[in-house]
Image: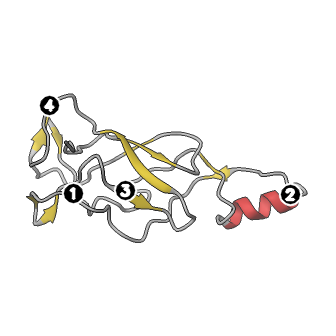
Amino acid sequence: MAKYVCMGAMLKCTFGLAPSTLIVTVPLRPMIQNKPKATIMDFAPMVNIMPFGMCQSMSNPTVASATAAAMGVLTPMPCIPVIVAPWAPGGKELITNMPALLDNCKLMCAYGGNISITNPGHTENTTAK
């Protein structure tokens, strides 16, 4: 069963070299262990989705440029997520008129990274319906 996701959930990107944390910026939501639940609309780069350390995607122009300058040796550069669509698929429950974010949802970075949730941010046994 999928679990609800809340503030502080741990995220990973297939091209990132470090984990990241989900930030929920709207506090007036249902809570899990005193942390606001997330929705599929919590996907804004540098607001909800923080960098994943260094990026190693050749689709990232800074990585491609640094790699070319290093004679083709892959050269990771700082991650700045570029996300253009909400989390998918989302849960059936609505939170502030948006589908709840569940730990089986995914995001895609414009540079090809697949962003997933590795920890929902709480220890309660709260599974989605």
Three-letter amino acid code at the position of disc 4 = Asn
**Foreground: disc 1 or disc 4:** 4
Pinpoint residue 6: horizontal percent, then vertical percent.
23, 43
Q: Which residue is located at x 11 percent, y 51 percent?
A: 29
> x and y percent of residue 96 in the render?
10, 62
* Residue under numbered circle 1: 39
The residue sitting at the right extreme is 71
Q: Secondary structure at mark 3?
A: strand
Which residue is labeled 2 in the image? Answer: 72
Circle 2 residues within 10 Å: few <14, some 14–19, many ≥20: few
Residue beneath label 3, please? 106
- What residue is shown at x 11% (from left), y 42% (from top)? 31
Left or right of 45 on screen, residue 75:
right
Residue type at mark 1 is: Thr
- Looking at marks 2 and 3 on the same chain, the residue that comes earlier in the sequence is marked by 2
Number of other residues with Cα within 10 Å of mark 1, as a class: few under 14, some 14 to 19, many 20 or more = many
Q: At 54% from the left edge and 39% from the top edge, which residue is drawn?
A: 18
Element under disc 2: loop
Residue at position x 26%, y 53% in the image: 25
Q: Of the residues under marks 4 and 2, which one precedes in the sequence?
A: 2
The residue that label 4 is drawn on is 125
Q: Earlier in the sequence, mark 1 or mark 4?
A: 1
